[in-house]
Amino acid sequence: MQHFAYSRVATLADAINAMQQPDAMVIAGGTELLNWMKEGIAAPARLIDVNGIADLAQVTADDRGLRIGALARLSDVAEHPVVRTAYPAIAQALLASASPQIRNMATIGGNLMQRTRCPYFRAEVEVPCNKRRPGSGCAAMSGNDRTAAVLGATAQCIATHPSDLAVALAALDATVHVTGASGPRSIPLVSFYRQPDGTTERETRLDAGELITAIEVPASAVARQSRYLKLRERASYEFALVSVAVGLDVEEGRIRAASIALGGVAPKPWRLCATEDALQRVTLSDEAAVRKTLTADFADATPGRHNGFKVELAKRAVVRALQMAGEGA
Ligand code: SF4
């Protein structure tokens, strides 16, 4: 780990000013950034500690929706009574994230800024990886692709995004609020992450010198009847092989509206828009009919050599998550 300067700021304005310095990075919980620094993924010259900006740790809710400050800790948000009752998929996704100790330290903003767990990206020895070393290639394509994407992958990168929270937020139409030297702006969560292209190393639409300030989630019937289901190698602590967040609005057993996002299968939280449309007026208890609605969204799946199982696993996970959401009606 190389030497770096460290400073604390107490206001958002001071944080934005400090972020304009070359090679500056924000540190909050530190549970992901310190990994990057140890692994050589990041080598900031300056760390700007933003933990003193109390306003950014607030969680508030009213009839219109939920606002989560970027510095709120995962455990605090997961246990918030309004989140548990009106946005249960968010609480469930957070409780399925990491260990209790990490959830006590990690922040909402930091969770969304996690980088892929592709083993080649995190490798201690140098291997081809377009995300780590642009233009070097992709070792996963000819190597171990068990955890790789089956939807939305490109010729540059087949890695998946690791955040559970992002999947729940994508399903619930959340908005990411960011700010920088040019002022504040808002980005829909579903557009916040980029699919791999010629600049694979850039994973989000956050510009240099910008930081996340808050997440907003609109209140809705779908959010109130939402569920998060995570399938992984071990239940205690692991990233998702496949995860799914669903929200439902059901009337007399028929689906009036559905919202679905997948995790662990794509470079970003993957909304199943065609499935959502096809589910309208389908009887929730008709499992065959529900499963049939998935056909279009999986028509373009591109499984690799070792991860073909993810396609079937994802389909079953969606059906099961919808049933679970329906049981909570
Ligand atoms: Fe790197 Fe992406 Fe290939 Fe993994 S899948 S080795 S992160 S380019």
Image (spheres, helix red, strand yellow):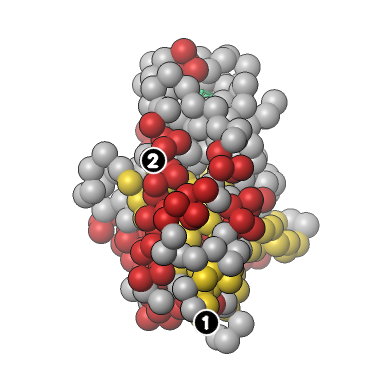
Mark 1 CB lies closer than 8 A to ligand 1: no
Q: Tell me: 258 left or right of 319.
A: right
Q: Residue furthest bottom?
A: 63
Quadrant placement of the N terminus = top left
Residue for point 50% across, 54% down: 289
Identify the residue position indicated by label 2 in the image: 313
Mark toward the start of the polypeptide (2 vs 1): 1
Q: Position of residue 284 (x, y in %)?
A: 46, 65
Which residue is painted at 39% across and 49% down in the image? Answer: 317
- The residue positioned 58% from the left and 67% from the top of the image is 281
The percent position of residue 71, horizontal first and vertical second, equals 47, 64
**Quarter location, residue 216:** bottom right
Vertical side of 306 occupied by 37: above or below: below
For disc 1, the marked residue is 61
Q: Amino acid at mark 2?
A: Leu
Rendered view: 99 above or below 297: below
Q: Nearer the viewer, residue 317 or 282?
A: 282
